[in-house]
Image (cartoon, rainbow, N blue to C red):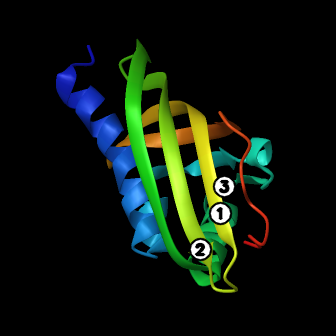
């Protein structure tokens, strides 16, 4: 039966993702996800990526196009479906400046699924929905 340690590991995965983005370390950001993960930011004007290669390629483009950025992850709610699967939500506030000087800003709601793997709990899917109108002009990742 899942316990508080499982919940903490899932929340840690969301923080690892954010830290990887903010350190411009795409591989660290990707380490929070399963190999077959889906990352869908169509709601904030970006794209949907499926699988390790597509998600990593996006994180690499992000790292190359951003001069500075931060992601605050909060308000985690995690619900377990069984011993190895869970779903949940969390909020993200992201701001940054691209290498071309454009400012971006987004407050969003993440709807996630999580799966226990041999390496621990990972994000299996993330759908990002804006809470306020995102400012993404000039972001070309």
Q: Residue at x 72, y 55 (%)?
A: 135
Of pointers 2 and 3, the one earlier in the residue sequence: 3
For the image shown, how many numbered marks are present on the structure? 3
Describe the element under mark 3 as helix, strand or loop. helix
Tell me, yes or no, whether the two marked residues, 1 and 3, touch with CB atoms within 8 Å.
no
Q: Which callout, 1 or 3, points to the residue nearer the camera? A: 1
Tell me, yes or no, whether the two marked residues, 2 and 3, touch with CB atoms within 8 Å.
no
Describe the element under mark 2 as helix, strand or loop. strand
CA distance for labels 2 and 3: 27 Å
> Does residue 118 appear in this view?
no
The vertical placement of 85 against 55, above or below, is above
Tell me, yes or no, whether the two marked residues, 2 and 1, touch with CB atoms within 8 Å.
yes
Q: Residue at x 50, y 68 (%)?
A: 69
Q: Quadrant of the C terminus?
A: bottom right
Q: Residues within 10 Å of mark 2 (few under 14, many from 20)?
A: some
Disc number at residue 97? Answer: 2
Disc number at residue 29? Answer: none
Which one is nearer the viewer's eye here, 71 or 6?
71
* Residue at numbered disc 1: 104
CA distance for labels 2 and 1: 6 Å
Which one is nearer the viewer's eye here, 67 or 54?
67
């Amino acid at each position: 039966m899942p316990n508080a340690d499982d919940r903490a590991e899932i929340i840690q995965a969301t923080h690892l993702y954010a830290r990887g983005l903010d350190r411009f370390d795409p591989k660290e950001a990707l380490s929070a996800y399963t190999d077959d993960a889906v990352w869908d930011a169509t709601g904030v004007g970006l794209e949907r990526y499926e699988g390790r290669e597509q998600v990593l390629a996006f994180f690499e483009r992000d790292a190359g196009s951003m001069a500075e950025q931060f992601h605050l992850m909060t308000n985690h709610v995690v619900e377990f479906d069984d011993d190895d699967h869970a779903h949940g939500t969390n909020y993200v506030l992201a701001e940054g400046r691209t290498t071309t000087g454009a400012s971006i800003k987004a407050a969003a709601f993440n709807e996630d699924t999580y799966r226990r793997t041999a390496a621990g709990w990972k994000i299996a899917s993330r759908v990002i929905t804006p809470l306020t109108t995102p400012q993404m002009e000039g972001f070309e990742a």
